[in-house]
Image (cartoon, helix red, strand yellow):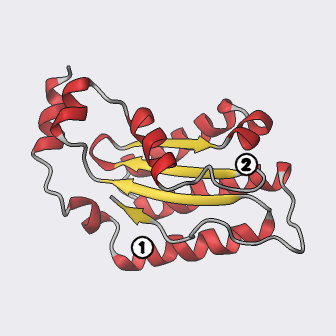
Amino acid sequence: MNFRRVLRHLFMPPWRARLVFPQRTLHTIEKAVREVEATHAGEIRFAVEGTLSLFPLIRGESARERALDVFSQLRVWDTEQNNGVLIYLLYADRDVEIIADRGVNIRAGNEAWEKICREMEAFFRKGDFEQGMLHGIREVAEQLAKHYPAQTKDKNEIDDRPVVL
């Protein structure tokens, strides 16, 4: 168990993530997701979580493990072509995880997602969360456009609104 991590999560106020991601920023992210989804047949969902609760921290749950749970809870996997992608930020850790459904992951591979995560985290280290998220959304969209080109009868299967957990 990482005591510094536990303390960071326990002493971070619950409203902190909402301060960094106010309604204006969430609206900007939603608009960006809607715009880039016109360039491909994939689905993108964004979620930010301020902190983890005590039990997952004691267990040593990683941001990746939590992102997999959120991927499932938000039903990002529930697309006809298995082409959903979750961009997840665990704010207390400044850790970004991209979870792609099996159809996308087979085509794009983990290296593409890892690169995008590290680029986003570089923005976050500078305190530029909005631009980091927008950069990530554009980069994920670029990967999706390569493997799932836009289709004329493409329907929006996943809500474009970002989620603050």
In the picture of the structure, the residue carrying the numbered disc 1 is: 25
Q: How crowded is the residue under tag 2: few (<14 C-alpha within 10 Å), some, or many (20+)?
A: some
Camera-nearest label, 1 or 2: 2
In the picture of the structure, the residue carrying the numbered disc 2 is: 82
Residue lying farthest right? 152
Q: How crowded is the residue under tag 1: few (<14 C-alpha within 10 Å), some, or many (20+)?
A: some
Q: Residue at x 36, y 78 (%)?
A: 23
Q: Residue at x 66, y 52 (%)?
A: 84
Of the pair 146 and 99, the residue shown nearer to us:
99
**Residue 130 lies in what quarter of the image?**
bottom left
Residue lying farthest top? 1
Is residue 49 visible in the rendered image? The answer is yes
What's the residue type where badge 2 is placed?
Asn
In the rendered image, residue 7, in percent from the top left (x then y), is placed at 11, 35
Q: Is residue 144 left or right of residue 124?
A: right
In the rendered image, residue 105, in percent from the top left (x then y), is placed at 71, 37
Please determine whether, in this image, residue 118 is positioned above or below residue 147: above
Q: Which tag, 1 or 2, sits closer to the chain's start? A: 1
**Residue 158 lies in what quarter of the image?**
bottom right
Please determine whether, in this image, residue 149 is positioned above or below residue 52: below
What's the residue type where badge 1 is placed?
Thr
Q: Residue at x 45, y 34 (%)?
A: 64
Of the pair 80 and 154, the residue shown nearer to us:
80
